[in-house]
Image: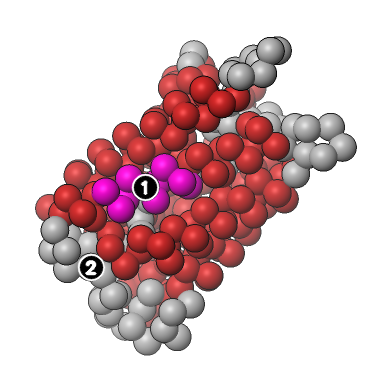
Amino acid sequence: MPLNRRLLAEFFGTFWLVFGGCGSAVLAAGIPDLGIAYAGVSLAFGLTVLTMAYAVGHISGGHFNPAVSVGLMVGGRFSAKDLVPYIVTQVIAGAAAAGVLYVIASGLPDFAVGGFASNGFGELSPHKYSMIACLVAEVVLTFFFLMIILGSTDRRAPAGFAPIAIGLGLTLIHLVGIPVTNLSVNPARSTGPALFAGGAYIGQLWLFWLAPIVGGALAGIVYPMMSGGRDAAVEPKS
């Protein structure tokens, strides 16, 4: 598949992840008596990945996340030469989705941007978790997310079920991580909203790049060791 087509698929997949997941938090979670709360936001993030993995995963591989691209590259599932174009596309898509969400959300007369579904630690953590706690949470949760991705897309795994496992996995890690960091595990997801929340949220972005990439890379090392080799997934060919 030509790179430009794969990048277009990554753009739409990442856009939908950020718009759908963060949109559920910004537009729906806080409505009195009708809000979907943490469980609803967690499910929304899982559904975005599940739906777009089926819709465009066969075109681009369905990364939608720089940490996933890094983890797959380290695990031998993705070409290093395509890493930078994928990451740049994912970040642009995340920013574009946050921009569209901002236009919609600001249509309320009393709109205040606030945290705008951004991630944070310390005073910016939903429940004021420390920087170390947030760093550990993001590394561990991203590690297990990549383990789910690598395992469910292994040629030896049951065919056709990977998007379900990945979507449910993302739902689960959001249920665990939203109270801690508002959950990232995805630098593109973190960057888009932070650009609109501004200030300290941008200053804390380093953690939400570093921790997911470390967690993803560790999974890329561990899974092949555990599975007995770098068994290739069904990855679109260049």
| Amino acid marked by disc 1 | Phe
Side of 118 where 147 appears, left or right: left
Residue in the picture at 84% in, 32% down: 32
Residue at the image point whose x is 82% and y is 40% from the top:
34
Q: Is residue 15 magenta?
A: yes
Residue 232 is situated, as x and y percent measured from the top left of the image, at: 26, 76
- Residue depicted at x 72% and y 50%: 39
Sort mark 1 into few (<14), some (14-19) or many (20+) by Cα contacts within 10 Å. some
Marks 2 and 1, how far apart at CA: 17 Å
Quick one: quadrant of the C terminus?
A: bottom left
Q: Secondary structure at mark 2?
A: loop
Tell me which residue sits at (50%, 39%) in the image: 19
Work out whether 230 lies above or below 209: below
Q: Label 2: which residue?
A: 236
Left/right of residue 157 with respect to residue 86 in the rendered view? right
Magenta range is 8-17
Residue 191 appears in the figure: no
Residue corresponding to mark 1: 12
